[in-house]
Image (tube, helix red, strand yellow):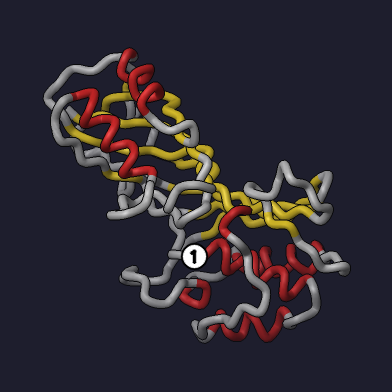
């Protein structure tokens, strides 16, 4: 039987989703807990890869077992897992529903704060520059991204994607009480794509690059050199969308 786990995690102390040989990861911690509870080796499949320090407010995982599980498994998992990982719900699905490939779309949010705040330091990017970025220019860049078909310019070198085509349906910067945030939604994302878009937005918003020059590089699929970076701490995987009736609650 195929089971799905809906969970969330704070990525500060974790080395991303994918299991690591010598470092804690979400997949590694989850498989260790599942294998202990079910008393069998369990391999999980996640809805995507997140890097070290990146957070997830909503993340889906599937695994297969012949054992019949119930809500008690949720309580058991939360007891075994580190405080940085929380299971929200467990469901069943048909065997052809896949955590990664069945997802129809995903959304991320990236948070930036201007005033030093120790309570935000591991969940938001502290932007130390005295000149604040121009959100109007950054949003003009985001509006143009909605017409881009290939996002190879924003992909980290060495990635194993077979193509760079993505459909971004929403990308907007908004003010927050102590900074700003990006909300971006697409059918798929390339490796490091969101952080590269954030860094590019900041370059445009701070006058380091012109929008016209950036869009010419995007058009020719030239990798954009980032003089302004977007640390992992500000990035949050916010939601994953699946076809209706993909899951059955336990």
Q: Which of 39 and 72 is in front in this view?
A: 39
Q: Quadrant of the C terminus?
A: top left
Image mark count: 1
Give the quarter of the image for residue 130.
bottom right
Q: Where is residue 162 in the image (x, y as percent from the top left)?
A: 31, 71
Query: Which residue is most to the right?
Result: 130
Q: Where is residue 148 in the image (x, y as percent from the top left)?
A: 55, 70
Is disc 1 placed on a helix, strand or loop? loop
Q: Which of 249 and 45 is in front in this view?
A: 45
Q: Which of 21 and 74 is in front in this view?
A: 21
31 on left or right of 167: left
In the displayed structure, would residue 118 be above or below residue 227?
above
Residue at figure coordinates x 45%, y 48% from the top left: 14
In the displayed structure, would residue 38 be above or below residue 125?
above
In the displayed structure, would residue 157 be above or below residue 4?
below
Residue at figure coordinates x 39%, y 22% from the top left: 79
64 on left or right of 160: left
160 on left or right of 220: left
Q: Quadrant of the N terminus?
A: top left
- Please give the residue where the numbered disc 1 appears in the rendered image: 192
Q: Which of 170 and 35 is in front in this view?
A: 35
11 on left or right of 71: right
Residue at figure coordinates x 46%, y 75% from the top left: 152
In the displayed structure, would residue 20 be above or below residue 241?
below
Q: Residues within 10 Å of mark 1 (few under 14, many from 20)?
A: some
Q: Position of residue 82 (x, y in %)?
A: 43, 33
Residue at figure coordinates x 63%, y 70% from the top left: 229
């Amino acid at each position: 039987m195929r089971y799905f786990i809906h969970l969330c995690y704070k990525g500060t102390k974790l080395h991303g989703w994918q299991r690591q040989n010598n470092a804690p990861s979400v997949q590694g911690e989850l498989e260790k807990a599942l294998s202990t509870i079910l008393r069998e080796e369990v391999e999980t499949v996640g809805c995507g890869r997140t890097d070290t320090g990146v957070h997830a407010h909503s993340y889906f995982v599937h695994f297969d077992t012949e054992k019949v599980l119930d809500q008690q498994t949720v309580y058991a998992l939360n007891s075994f897992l580190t405080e940085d990982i929380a299971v929200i719900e467990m469901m069943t699905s048909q065997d052809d529903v896949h955590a990664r490939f069945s997802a129809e779309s995903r959304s991320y949010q990236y948070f930036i704060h201007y005033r030093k705040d120790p309570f935000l330091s591991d969940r938001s990017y502290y932007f130390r520059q005295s000149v604040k970025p121009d959100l109007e220019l950054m949003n003009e860049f985001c509006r143009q991204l909605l017409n881009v078909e290939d996002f190879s310019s924003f992909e980290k070198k060495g990635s194993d994607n077979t193509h760079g085509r993505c459909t971004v349906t929403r990308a907007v910067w908004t003010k927050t009480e102590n900074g700003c945030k990006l909300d971006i939604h697409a059918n798929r994302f390339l490796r490091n794509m969101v952080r590269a878009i954030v860094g590019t937005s900041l370059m445009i918003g701070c006058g380091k690059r012109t929008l016209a020059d950036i869009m010419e590089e995007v058009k020719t699929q030239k990798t954009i050199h980032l003089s302004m970076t977007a640390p992992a701490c500000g990035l949050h995987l916010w939601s994953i969308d699946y076809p209706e009736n993909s899951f059955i609650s336990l």
